[in-house]
Amino acid sequence: MLWTARMHIFVIAFSIIMTQNTLQPADITDELLATYETVIGLEVHCQLLTESKLFARDVNRFGTEPNTNIGPLTLALPGTLPKINKKAIEYAVRLGLACGCSISRKTTFDRKNYFYPDLPKGYQISQDKKPICENGGVAISFKNAEGKTTDKVIRFHHIHLEEDAGKSVHEGDQEETLLDYNRAGTPLVEMVSEPDLRSAEETGAFVTEIRRLVRYLGISDGNMEEGSLRCDVNVSVRKYGAPEYGTKVEIKNMNSIRNMMRAISFEERRQVALVESDGQVQQETRMFDVDNGQTYGMRVKETMNDYRYFPDPDLSPVVISEEWLSAITSAMPALPHELREKFVNQYGIPTYDAMVLTDTKEIADYFEAVCNKTPAYKTVSNWLMGPVKSFLNENGGDIALFPVSPQSLADLIDLAESGTVSNSVATQKIFPVLLAEPQREPKEIAATNNWLQNSNTNELESLVDEVINSMPDKVAAYRKGKKGLIGLFVGEVMKKSNNTADPKLVNQLLAKKL
């Protein structure tokens, strides 16, 4: 008994020492973290905007009542046979072309075997041996730790097609798991990157660019909050200069760019803490807790999952002919990087403006529509990044909700550019009226409210005289060298004219009089 007690005390003491010597993620300083390199690879799952599912005629639609978009094939009833959705193939090829991938002219489907309640067939139809797109990549631009903008290309290993699983639903405190098969069979493209990413910032920029790309292509809405776009993130760390990658950990089902970046930032510190404590990073699948900002273990991964892939005997290979590929290529829309180059070269706006205006296809289209009505391209850019953006920020951010037509905005810009109205009147008076009554014409609004700019020299000269005569001390100070007072005089004349005076003419008259 005495020996047992001593051993028990020793074990407790040893445990305390080991606990004290084990670093926690919060203990990892930025200086120590900087001696490690984080290596990140992504598997990005993107739901395609087809009318029906990948191998069935069931409707592909988000937000309907549970288990209403299902049929015999989705439920894997006996005797049902899959048939490939041609539009899904075309969407996957469109994505591959946009990413510079090589397109497989003969692609096949495989069965990925695993059991889970939301998988009706007991296997998932996917692509293993011959994915539809291989290689390629996406160019990103991001700010590094020093705040410097960096450009980089993130390579893809491949892009493949597969069907989505159903959805497990846990309501309240119920112990039961409910199953909704509406999502089962929805067409997905899975984009598997090479381990080229090195930080949370890079990864955020990468997913942002992918989301922008699929929206431009019209193949997905990219709504992460609805699960249309979600990521599995593989993270490992190694000392700078180490030839081998560290043990990777997979963080599953990230459906928010911000939370994905938070998860990476925590996970890299957690792994460095383990390595620095002479521990070992375990290859496992982890989840992210958005409340405490930490990852936690879900299941231990083996060195390789045994999904027992084999060719699906019910699906023939898909052959993509030269004619079909040519037709898909010719229907490709302009991509974000192509529009940025066009906006800079054709419209002469700065690169920064072009980046902002191509953030969404809808904004880019609206910008071009206005530029087709007026030659004041830079002013159009200023309006979209200024007053128009402020309106969108206050009203949901969707340009489709902006009530002013491209023609009306171009007319308003031309009024200010020609000096018919002042810039302040255009932005602060006419624009709000146009938002409330978009059917009215800007010039009619200005004329009705007496906002047309006054360029009558005799009338303005009279106002200038009034201001000068009312401020003799300021006039004396101006004539003694305080030339900055000119702004005061101009402001007073503008007030007297109800902001309709031509500022350039007012400046000229004041300079002459003073």
Image: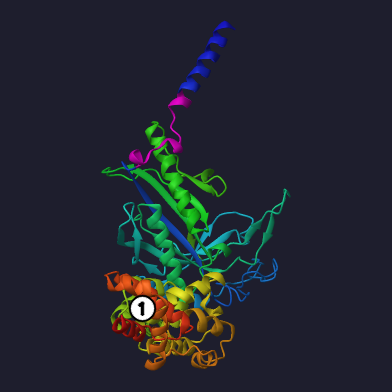
Query: How many callouts does the rendering have?
Result: 1
Q: Residue at x 58, y 86 (%)?
A: 437
Where disc 1 sits, the SS reads: helix
For the question of whether residue 456 can be seen, the reply is no
In percent of width and height, residue 323 lies at 38, 85
Identify the residue at image location x=27%, y=44%: 243
Q: Looking at numbered disc 1 in the image, what kind of residue is underneath it?
A: Leu
- Left or right of residue 188: residue 77: right
Q: Is residue 29 magenta?
A: yes
| Region in magenta | 18-33
Q: Is residue 9 above or below residue 264?
A: above
- x, y percent for residue 458: 39, 93
* Residue furthest to the top: 2
Q: Residue at x 56, y 62 (%)?
A: 225
Q: Is residue 380 magenta?
A: no
Provide residue 30's location: percent of width, then percent of height. Answer: 36, 41
Magenta region's main secondary structure? Answer: helix
| Quarter of the image where one finds residue 488 | bottom left
Q: Which quarter shows the N terminus?
A: top right
Instruction: Give the colour scheme shown.
Output: rainbow
State which quadrant residue 73 falls in: bottom right
How busy is the neighbourhood of tag 1: few (under 14 within 10 Å), some, or many (20 plus)?
Answer: many
In the image, residue 24 above or below residue 21: below
Residue identifier under label 1: 339
* Residue found at x 55% / y 91%: 440
Q: Relative to residue 169, is residue 373 drawn left or right?
A: left
Q: Where, quadrant-wise, is the C terminus in this rendering?
A: bottom left
Given residues 128 and 422, the one toward you in this image is 422
- Pick the residue in front: 388 or 70: 388
Coordinates of residue 509 in the picture (x, y in percent): 33, 85
Asked if residue 392 shows in the view, the reply is: yes
- Pick the front one: 119 or 11: 11
